[in-house]
Image: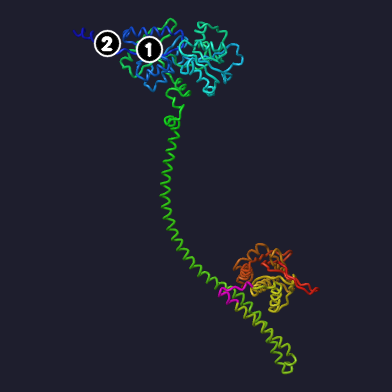
Amino acid sequence: MKKTVLAVFLILVPLVCHAEPLRMGISSRVPNTNEEFLQTTIQTLKNKFGPDNVKVTYYSLKGLEEAVKAGQVDFMQSSAGMYRRLLPEGVRDLVALSSPRYPDPNQSEGTAFVTRADRTDLQTVKDLKGKILAANSPTGFSGYHIGMHEISKQGYDPEKFFSKQIFVGEEHRMKHVLEALKNGTADVGFLRLCYFEDMLEKAGYKKEDFKIIGDRKSNRLACSHSTSLYPSWTISITPKISPAEARELLQTLLAIPPSSNGVRWSPASDYHSVDTLLKDLKLGPWAYLREWTLKRFINEYWPWIMLLFVCIAGLIAHVIRCERLIKIRTAQLSKAHKKHTEVLHQAEEANSRLESLQKMGAIGLMSGMLAHEIRQPIASIQLYGRGIQRIIDGGVGAIKANAEDIQNAVYLIDQQCSKINAIVEKVRSYSKSKSSRNQVLNLKTVVQESILNFRTSRKNQVDIRLKGPSSILVSGDKLELELVLVNLLRNSLEAQKTDSILPIDISISTEKGLALITISDQAKTMSQEEIWKMEKPLNSSKAKGLGLGLPIVKSIIEAHGGKITFKPNIPKGLIVEIQIPCLGEEEKNEEAGTTTDKNC
């Protein structure tokens, strides 16, 4: 009983599974010697599933594609290119054609570039640029796409390579490609692999009338071809077929014995070359590359889009961080500004106190120098006073006899007292921050009076020689300039350290708007290092000196807008050069008795 039920079940299962007929779609193909094997395959499937359970429909290339998309096909036989173009529709391969000529099902299809044998100008693929092409169909795989991909692989734009393309049609019209070559309508034609060997003479043409450009035929590869090789005819299934039917279909196809010429169905393992072709030619799943759609833009530039989003995110994070840092920095700057304002206020108060201290310091420095200068008029007063005293001691007669000398001595005493008073007033003016450096002075007069005062204050004789124009006008303070000159003369004299009298030369001149005073002596030779030390404050060569004289002299000259320099005098001695702005130069023509002024 159980065996009977099992037998009935096995009989009914195929009937249930194939309640709906299996719909097989076949694309139009270029005729070849494998056509007989395809008919054997169809008959084997009808024997297996029943004549009424297998419905075979022949389509054009475009028609088969539309039928699959419409869900009207369960499995199909087509080129590898058609199969891979329909991958987005869920189509998957089962088997591919193989033969003794091309036993590898992954490399059993190609294209031959054919031209007339007498076209000596066409030798390589490069020579085909700008020529006219004849092919079967713009959707044909071996008849068009494989050839165009080879042109792309050689670095050319396939869409702009030929000047014109002629499509003769599908199915049995491949012979029209040869006809276009024969009558000169086209320069080159695309023929399916082995068509040249198997079908050319059947179409009524002679092989010697044509040649293959870029032929890759070898002992291992039986047919002429100009391109790389790809998978050949492929049987594939659509999502409409059930897994049980697909399994039974695969078993049936693999069980079909080889044809008389060794053709059979075998699994193909590598369709990568077909995918590369479709992508390079922008077909099938890559057709979007022909138009700038959002999908293409995303697929084409997704790494850059991701990078852009990362950059934008980074920029936003940077902006947020910068805003935070700006707030922190603003708070810090506000705090620092407040502190800086307080420091400035404290600095102003400190500067005010410092200015007062500087005034006091200046007065202290000047006092030491001016006190020394006061001794000169005091010494002169004492000298004149003693002279008058000796005259008085001589009696009334001596007084009457020297009345003029007494009168002259009194006048000189008065002059020296006036000078003392001027010195005192100068100290007072410093304490009150008053400046009198805007007096118009004759520089030569100032120098002459300085020399006179210096000579009067000295007990020993001095040799001072002065040369220069009669008048050079400067703006300054007479007393300060006298103090500078007297101090420099005293230093020169004290530096001699000898019993002999060495001359001190003073010259005045003008140069480029400056009044120049040059004091040179013949005292000891000084090195440049000694001169640098001499200019520093609190550095004196005198045993009891404070080292304040030259710094004060320098400060006075700089206050007059000038400068003072020291350099060795060759072969010995020192040269001091003072530069201060001058106002003009007055020259007197003694013979003409006239006076003229001119800019210095």
Q: Quadrant of the C terminus?
A: bottom right
Against 247, is 463 above or below? below
Residue placed at 55% from the left, 72% from the top? 359
Against 463, is 22 above or below? above
Q: Quadrant of the N terminus?
A: top left
Residue 516 at x, y percent in the picture: 70, 67
Report the disc number at residue 57: 1
What is the three-letter code of the residue carrying label 1? Answer: Thr
Residue extending furthest bottom? 396
Whether residue 185 appears in magenta in the rendering, the answer is no
Residue placed at 41% from the left, 44% from the top? 317
Residue at the spot of label 2 = 15
In-front residue for pair 321/171: 171
Quadrant hosting residue 445: bottom right
Q: Is residue 411 left or right of residue 33?
A: right
- The span shown in magenta is 426-438
